Image (spheres, rainbow, N blue to C red):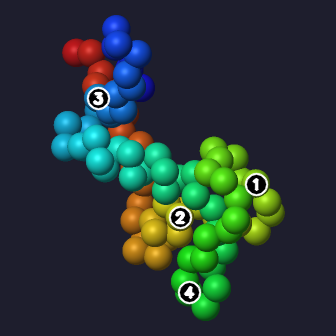
C-alpha cells in the first residue's frame, strides 16, 4: 500500500505488472472473507472481514477458489544481481 500526500491509499503489487487495482482489491477482500464448504459450495460465515481466521473450521474464499481450481501459488524469487 502506498499513501500519497492527500492521504489516499493505492493498492498495488510492484512485482506483477498485469495486476489491476480491481484485481488487487478482489484478492485482498477474498482472503479476508471466511466461510465453510458445504456440499462443495463455499458458504459465507457471519463474521466480518478479518485477516485471521475468526473460528476453527472456516476457510477463506480465496483459498476455496484456489483449491477448487487447483491453482498453485508460486512465490517468485527476487532478481539476483549479476
Quarter of image, res 77: top left
Kindly state the secondary structure of the residue where label 2 is placed: helix
Furthest toward the left, the residue is 18
Q: Residue 5 carries which label?
A: none
Q: Which residue is drawn at 38% across and 45% down?
A: 25
The number of numbered discs placed on residues in the rendered structure image is: 4
The alpha-carbon separation of the residues under discs 1 and 3 comes to: 30 Å
The alpha-carbon separation of the residues under discs 4 and 2 comes to: 13 Å
Q: Which of marks 3 and 2 is nearer the N terminus?
A: 3
Furthest toward the bottom, the residue is 39
Quarter of image, res 43: bottom right
Kindly state the secondary structure of the residue where label 3 is placed: loop
The residue that mark 1 highlights is 54
Q: Earlier in the sequence, mark 2 or mark 1?
A: 1
Kindly state the secondary structure of the residue where label 4 is placed: loop
Verify CB contact (< 8 Å) between mark 3 and mark 2: no
Which percent across, then down, holds residue 21?
Answer: 28, 41
Looking at the image, residue 65 lies above or below residue 20: below
Q: Nearer the viewer, mark 4 or mark 1?
A: 1
The residue that mark 2 highlights is 61
Could you tell me which quadrant the C terminus lies in? top left
Which percent across, then down, holds residue 46?
Answer: 70, 65
Kindly state the secondary structure of the residue where label 1 is placed: loop
Q: Which of marks 4 and 1 is nearer the N terminus?
A: 4
Amino acid at each position: 500500500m502506498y499513501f500519497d500526500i492527500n492521504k489516499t491509499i493505492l493498492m498495488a503489487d510492484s512485482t506483477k505488472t498485469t495486476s489491476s487495482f480491481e484485481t488487487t482489491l478482489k484478492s485482498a477482500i477474498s482472503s479476508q472473507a471466511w466461510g465453510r464448504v458445504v456440499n462443495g459450495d463455499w458458504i459465507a460465515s457471519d463474521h466480518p472481514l478479518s485477516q485471521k481466521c475468526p473460528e476453527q473450521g472456516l476457510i477463506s474464499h480465496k483459498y476455496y477458489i484456489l483449491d477448487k481450481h487447483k491453482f498453485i501459488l508460486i512465490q517468485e524469487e527476487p532478481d539476483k544481481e549479476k
